[in-house]
């Protein structure tokens, strides 16, 4: 089989269905301002789930794709709240231990200046956490044990960048945060620290070493200076709504070290604007190069000098508005954008021979529209996103296949998604899909240039409140920018297809609902791939030889009380 890099005709993928998936929404006002302003008459579903990741926010469940044509890894799943829960009651802050006792004096009531004491009774673990409540613990996690019919360990069998989450690897986040109300200023603060753990775990390989990442370490202040104003700084997963079945955030999913501010205003604070800027420096020669040089004043040995040492600036802006409809339903609209920039520099190509590295830039423009009923997490979400130049490669991937001037001009990524969820009685259907097109900066087509898409659906039936059965089916297709010789002298585009079907019985203490957790489940997944899909793997890879695969496993998934999966 010979490959011919001649230009490939346009890909004609199957149309994605009109009803599909996306992880919920988040337009409820901040608890701080909710205590001071009337609540909106309706609020959208709330998203709560790295893969792969968001991260944070996001990572990913894996460090990130090696293929520069792939988007950034997502992380984990999302719960969706279709009604805006009332702000959680807040506790009065406790004075320091060294404060002298004072006589109790009746003061005039100031309803907006101090939170009321907490109410008695149980709290739903999937409700958004309130402010000024002291210390909190939250977590997301999934642990899976399984393998194929031959005893080999399970692995990702998708050919598209974002496929079914059933064969995602083990991943967990542990979050500790401190929340306070400051009576002097009427402000609230939230300090968040989130540690993430990825495969492999000690109990699997016996190695006392862990893949650990710090996904959140930031402080956010709300109501300091103006009602509805929030300010934050630190390291943060910064993202919006996700597609649970595909385990990714299609519009906004940044992992950033920087700061930002938000402002909610209007009737019921149904309009909000958020801006942010942050820096990163992926470990790649595109961003930095070290060389060995003699120390100052002829000292012994060599010392390392960073010749090329540049960071990437990523800034974002997001405008959100909620339109209430009759009853508990509504519509949420989002306009979103990013700006990416990397400065110029200089690197060494041979001993004492240098070349200039040009500065570069890119942008993202996109939007989201969500319709929701406010009942049983029923919603429908559509997103569109276009990234150009440096931004087309994602936040952590270093650009490849550049123009002759070594810039990313001409590179782009376009993505359209549709997702949703419907529930009634003991029945529910969750579905989603996307179409994605990526082109690198090189004018000629190559293997990194991709057209791809997937449709996926998961119907579920519950048997009472404690157990249920889900079925999952998906179809995916991917075309690469190369051709293969299907017959002597006949060249066709590489267009691979994969079909997958799974059955997932589960038990849960949380009752009915696609976004109720925890779950303990069994799974069986059947995968069929055509010859073009098998050609995408190396010759000795079992996926290059197998037309059919079987995955059998047992797993657990949970999330509760984590700010990474609740939107303010």
Image (tube, rainbow, N blue to C red):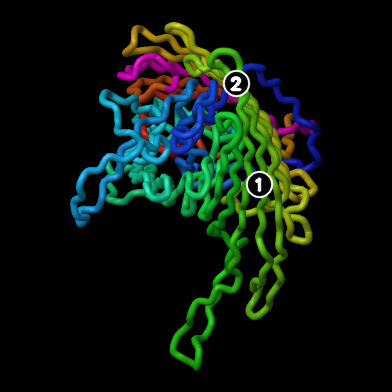
- Taking depth in this image into account, of 127 and 142 the one nearest to the observer is 127
Q: Which residues are magenta?
A: 489-515
Check disc 1 and report its element: helix, strand or loop.
strand
- The image shows residue 21, relative to residue 470, as above or below, that is below
Q: Tell me, yes or no, whether the highlighted magenta stretch contains residue 499.
A: yes
Gap between marks 1 and 2, in whole Å?
28 Å
Residue plotted at (55% across, 15% down)? 373
Residue 268 in view: yes
Q: Nearer the viewer, mark 1 or mark 2?
A: 2
**Quick check: marks 1 and 2 in contact, CB under 8 Å?**
no
Reading the image, the residue beneath label 1 is 338
240 vs 49, left or right, is right
Q: Can you give x and y, in whole percent of width and height, for residue 344 in the image?
A: 68, 66
Residue plotted at (72% across, 50% down)? 389
Reading the image, the residue beneath label 2 is 324
Q: How packed is label 1: few (under 14 Cα within 10 Å), some, or many (20 or more)?
A: many
- The image shows residue 282, relative to residue 456, as above or below, that is below
508 vs 67, left or right, is left
Determine the main secondary structure of the stretch shown in magenta: strand
Q: Can you give x and y, in whole percent of width and height, for residue 405 in the image?
A: 78, 61
- Taking depth in this image into account, of 385 and 350 the one nearest to the observer is 385
In which image quadrant can residue 239 be found? top right
In which image quadrant can residue 151 be found? top left
Q: Residue 523 shows which numbered tag? A: none
Residue plotted at (30% across, 44% down)? 93
Check disc 2 and report its element: helix, strand or loop.
strand
Q: How packed is label 2: few (under 14 Cα within 10 Å), some, or many (20 or more)?
A: some
Residue plotted at (61% across, 41% down)? 273
138 vs 396, left or right, is left
188 vs 17, left or right, is left
Q: Tell me, yes or no, whether the highlighted magenta stretch contains residue 117.
A: no
């Amino acid at each position: 089989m010979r490959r011919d890099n001649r230009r490939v005709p346009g890909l004609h993928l199957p149309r994605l269905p009109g009803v599909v998936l996306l992880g919920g929404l988040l337009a409820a006002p901040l608890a701080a301002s909710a205590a001071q302003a009337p609540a909106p008459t309706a609020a959208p579903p709330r998203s709560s789930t790295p893969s792969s990741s968001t991260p944070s926010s996001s990572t990913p469940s894996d460090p990130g794709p090696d293929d520069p044509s792939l988007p950034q890894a997502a992380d984990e799943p999302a719960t969706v709240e279709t009604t805006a829960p009332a702000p959680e009651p807040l506790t009065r802050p406790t004075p320091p231990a060294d404060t002298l006792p004072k006589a109790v004096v009746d003061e005039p009531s100031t309803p907006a200046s101090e939170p009321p004491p907490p109410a008695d009774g149980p709290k739903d673990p999937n409700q958004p956490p309130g402010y000024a409540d002291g210390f909190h613990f939250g977590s997301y996690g999934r642990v899976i044990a399984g393998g194929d019919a031959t005893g080999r360990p399970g692995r990702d069998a998708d050919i598209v960048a974002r496929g079914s989450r059933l064969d995602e690897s083990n991943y967990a986040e542990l979050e500790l945060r401190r929340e306070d109300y400051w009576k002097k200023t009427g402000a609230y603060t939230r300090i968040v620290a989130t540690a993430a753990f990825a495969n492999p775990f000690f109990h699997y390989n016996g190695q006392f070493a862990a893949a650990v990442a710090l996904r959140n370490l930031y402080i956010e202040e709300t109501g300091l200076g103006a009602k509805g104003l929030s300010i934050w700084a630190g390291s943060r997963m910064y993202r919006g709504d996700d597609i649970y079945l595909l385990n990714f955030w299609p519009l906004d999913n940044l992992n950033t070290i920087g700061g930002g501010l938000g402002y909610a205003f209007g009737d019921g604070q149904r309009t909000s604007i958020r801006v942010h800027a942050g820096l990163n420096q992926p470990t790649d020669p595109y961003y930095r190069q070290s060389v060995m040089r003699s120390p100052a004043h002829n000292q012994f040995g060599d010392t390392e000098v960073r010749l090329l040492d540049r960071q990437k600036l990523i800034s974002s802006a997001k405008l959100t508005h909620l339109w209430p409809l009759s009853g508990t339903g509504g519509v949420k609209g989002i306009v979103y954008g990013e700006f990416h920039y990397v400065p110029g520099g200089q690197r060494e190509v041979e001993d004492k021979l240098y070349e200039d590295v040009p500065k570069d830039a890119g942008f993202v423009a996109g939007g989201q529209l969500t319709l929701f009923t406010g009942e049983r997490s029923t919603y429908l979400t559509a997103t569109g996103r276009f990234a150009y130049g440096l931004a087309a490669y994602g936040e952590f991937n270093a650009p490849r296949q550049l123009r002759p001037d070594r810039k990313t001009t001409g590179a782009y990524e376009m993505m359209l998604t549709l997702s949703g969820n419907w529930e009634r009685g003991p029945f529910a259907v969750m579905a989603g899909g996307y179409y994605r097109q990526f082109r690198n900066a090189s004018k000629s087509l190559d293997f990194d240039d991709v057209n791809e898409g997937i449709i996926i659906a998961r119907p579920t039936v519950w048997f009472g409140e404690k157990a249920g059965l889900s079925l999952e089916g998906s179809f995916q297709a991917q075309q690469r920018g190369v051709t293969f010789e299907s017959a002597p002298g006949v060249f066709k585009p590489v267009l691979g297809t994969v079909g997958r079907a799974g059955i997932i019985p589960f038990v849960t203490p949380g009752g009915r609902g696609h976004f109720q957790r925890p779950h303990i489940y069994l799974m069986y997944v059947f995968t069929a791939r055509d010859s073009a899909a098998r050609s995408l793997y190396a010759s000795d890879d079992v996926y290059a030889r197998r037309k059919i695969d079987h995955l059998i496993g047992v797993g657990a998934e949970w999330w509760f009380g984590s700010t990474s999966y609740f939107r303010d």
